[in-house]
Image (cartoon, rainbow, N blue to C red):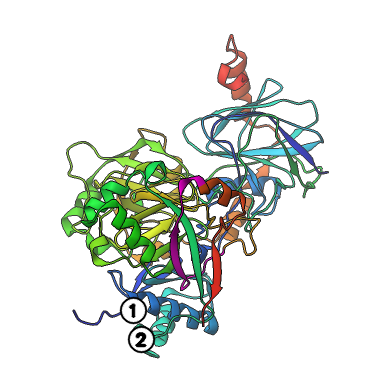
Amino acid sequence: MTQPSPQILPLGLDGVLVRFADSLSEEANRAALAYRAALDAARPPGVVETATSLTSVLVRFRPGETGREALEDVLNEALAERDWYAAPLPRGRALWRIPAVFGGADGPELEEVAEAAGVTAGTAVEEIAAADLRVLALGFAPGQPYLGFLDAHWNIPRHTNVTAEVPRGAVVVAVRQVIPFANAAPTGWRQIGRTPFRCYSRQGTPAIPLAAGDAVRFEPVPARDFDRLTEAGPLGGAVREALE
Amino acid sequence: MSGRLIVHRAGPGLTVQDLGRPGGMGLGLSRGGAADRYGFLDGAALLGNPPGAAALEMTVGGGRFGVDAPARFALSGAPLRATLNGSAVAPFATHAIAPGDVLDIGPAEGGVYGYLHISGGLLTEEELGGRGRHRIAGLGPDLADGDELPFGDDPEPGAAPLRLVPRAPGDQPVRVIPGPQTDLFSADARARFEATTFLRSPKGNRQGVRLDGDGDGAPFATEAQLGQVSDFISEGDIQMTGDGTPFVLLADCQTMGGYPRIGTVIPADLPRIAQAVPGAKLRFRFVPLSEAEATWQSDDDIYRAARKRREARIRDPREMSDLLSYELVDRPDPEVAG
């Protein structure tokens, strides 16, 4: 496979998307994080917001203050400054250990997911607990992380039919990623567990605990611990450890 | 004078809304805010409230309201059928309301999202920079019968009654610009998309509106339909779900999603999607970015344009005819009378 090259694309009338890859990769995710940090430091005129997704950077601008072409020139110059795919992860990262209940009523699709991954349900939980996951991006709802990467046999597609609603804290998987849901929401991903960890809580300090680049490990806990951990506070028993 | 807006009856779909919470895409928070920004800003402009002053958004459920202090109010967005103490009140106009008055708001006519603005704006609690209900983000209050919502000081106390002619929605095909995933769709699929007359499905909410095809077309799937990498979503994006059914994403859309999007409805035309009633016919047309960019208006631009449309409301013949029509009805409409 050849080295991907970044693309600059329109996203709505006041947005530009700098896409580092059109398939998910660790390099493209690192590139997006580093490129956004550099843009935030440079503060190009007319830019009102930047954000990273899994492999892209969103640059939202005020059309009255800068034109799309002028902004794209600035973004292209920044792209040429370095090999963004070789950029290191952001500084000040943390490792989070997040408790979760897997299977049973809290993970109704665990068996089906394990079968799709070609392992037993028990092995599936062991593999998820052993995976060194990383917050690739916060997205969908406030503070909700897209965590990757599970091994290649976890490249399970989304459902063709959307599940009407999974509960807050649902741990869902698809396409080599895991997501703890910030709120009850419809999803095409498959629910294998549930965590008492709150992705966003106005009582929390900070309200949004996770940041893109942070490391995450899931720690399986018995279903009977769920209520106790929920009552422990918005972190739901999750523990933060500074890295570096 | 500030006071409290009393919710005697909260119809389904009644929410506090403002212009949303911009700037949170990196945290997973989409902007949200009024489903029809143009319609919302008409009401703020009528009263002289600041553009972002919070108001009530309502759908077919309407509601019944009162105040504990004198104030002015205005109805905007989808034309709401309303009475004040049993007498019809015209939408797109300012009216006085005093303690003891009963404002009954029935279903919108020819639209989905209507707004009740009160002078001074609603001052309900702010969270993450906004007051509005954003369901998928878990923000803002769920309203219930008996709620009392504080509002601020009238910015134009004693102002003469005003009205405003709302912006005409137009009947040309809804304009769409290409987005990052438009190229995933074949030229044939895009042409078929433009040639299809869609019907606004009964399935729709503030997150998005489903479109049903005219029955004989294949769904708009791409080859990479279910394994696509999740990426940023923009309000107005036309997303093709797993089976190739289009959804147009509205204010409360998620920030990221994996279903491919054929294009983005331009902001100037998005109110037509939000306000399309179930069964309404919708057609789409791709326009070049340069053509679309000429339609761009910031919230302040939209607000200023609405302010310019304000005019004195001395003898409004439309309201007179409304009054007559209400008096000819034997019994009050139960929806309106609550």
> Given the image, what chain letter belongs to the residue carrying mark 1?
A
Q: Residue at x 52, y 66 (%)?
A: A210
On the image, the x and y values in percent for residue A43 come to 54, 81
Quarter-wise, where is residue A220 in the image? bottom left
| Residue type pointed to by label 1 | Glu
Q: Is residue B294 visible?
A: no
Image check: B323 left or right of B60? Answer: right
Question: What numbered label is drawn on residue A163?
Answer: none
Q: Which residue is mark 1?
A: A27
Is A216 contained in the magenta span?
yes
Q: Residues within 10 Å of mark 1 (few under 14, many from 20)?
A: some
In the rendered structure, which disc, 2 or 1, sits on the residue that comes first in sequence?
1
Q: Residue furthest bottom?
A: A81
Q: Which residue is mark 2?
A: A86
Quarter-wise, where is residue A106 in the image? top left
| Residue type pointed to by label 2 | Ala
Quarter-wise, where is residue A200 in the image? bottom right
Q: Nearer the viewer, residue B335 or B12?
A: B12
Q: Are marks 2 and 1 in contact (CB under 8 Å)?
A: yes
**Image: B123 above or below B86:** below
Q: Which residues are magenta?
A: A209-224
